Amino acid sequence: MSARLAVAVDVHRVIAEDAQWCDVVHGLAPASRAVALAHGLVHGSILTRRGRDREVCLEAGLLLWIHAQANPVLDAAAIVSHVLGTLWFCAPLVVSMAVLHAWRGERTWAWVWLALGSSTFILQECLKQLAGRTRPDLWPRLVSENSFSFPSGHALASATLYPLLAWHLARHVRNPWLPWLIGLGLPLFIGGGRLYLGVHWPTDVLAGWTLGAAQFWLATEWLERGRPRGPAPQA
């Protein structure tokens, strides 16, 4: 508990130290503000060790604010979001979609699902080992996680697989907005759940979303190039 209290104290200290600098930067015109921030990055005033500590404290501050909103309903929703991003949920989804496409003779789609499922697992495991970032420990967790923190595998998987599923379904229904609403909403729901549960830093989730979106984009580019022009086939 003392360690968590120390983090909270550090958050308030960093915010107080940054208040004057933030007031100056936000008082500038947008172009000047961008120059000021770029100058800080180039000359290391942000990427120094103190800058990295400040970033961690600000991320911890955001997590503590989210945790302050906790209630039983949100607890239950966060547990659901956790399940939707687990290996035990996503792997059957990948295999099921691959088998379905193979049965329908859509071998390219089948291979894409298998490739993305494999790359998602391998990419997150490799990056976690390379980064070696520890998970936040700010309050007792509702779920147990023992691996490294960066990037969020839940965010990566959800931003890869659910938009791909939505893209496929949207081509075969009259109202494509519904699959897209679900396909884009689930990554946000799952990523937000990681922050609510306190098992990831915000930048872990942002990195997972970015990597997942990149994988999804590459998959759709490959599928579009191999698709014959004309009306989409009926489901």
Image (spheres, helix red, strand yellow):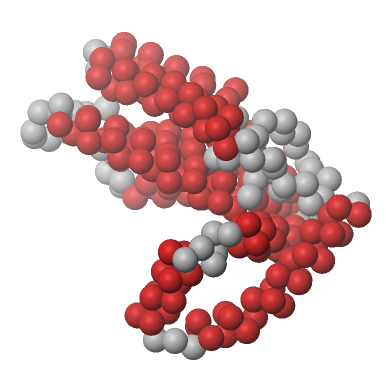
Front position in the image: 43 or 213: 43
Would you say residue 179 is visible in this rendering?
Answer: no
Q: Position of residue 75 (x, y in %)?
A: 74, 48
Q: Residue at x 63, y 50 (%)?
A: 201
Q: Position of residue 221 (x, y in %)?
A: 22, 36
Quarter-of-image position of residue 6: bottom right
Front position in the image: 64 or 83: 64
Give left or right: position of 118 versus 235.
right
Q: Position of residue 26 (x, y in %)?
A: 50, 83
Q: Residue at x 43, y 33 (%)?
A: 161
Q: Residue at x 22, y 30 (%)?
A: 222
Q: Residue furthest front?
A: 43
- Check the image and report above or below for 96 versus 22: above
Quarter-of-image position of residue 226: top left
Q: Quadrant of the C terminus?
A: top left
Quarter-of-image position of residue 190: top right
Q: Residue at x 28, y 22 (%)?
A: 109
Q: Position of residue 220 (x, y in %)?
A: 26, 35
- Check the image and report above or below for 173 versus 39: above
Q: Residue furthest right?
A: 2
Would you say residue 16 is visible in this rendering?
Answer: yes
Count of numbered marks: 0
Give left or right: position of 203 versus 159.
right
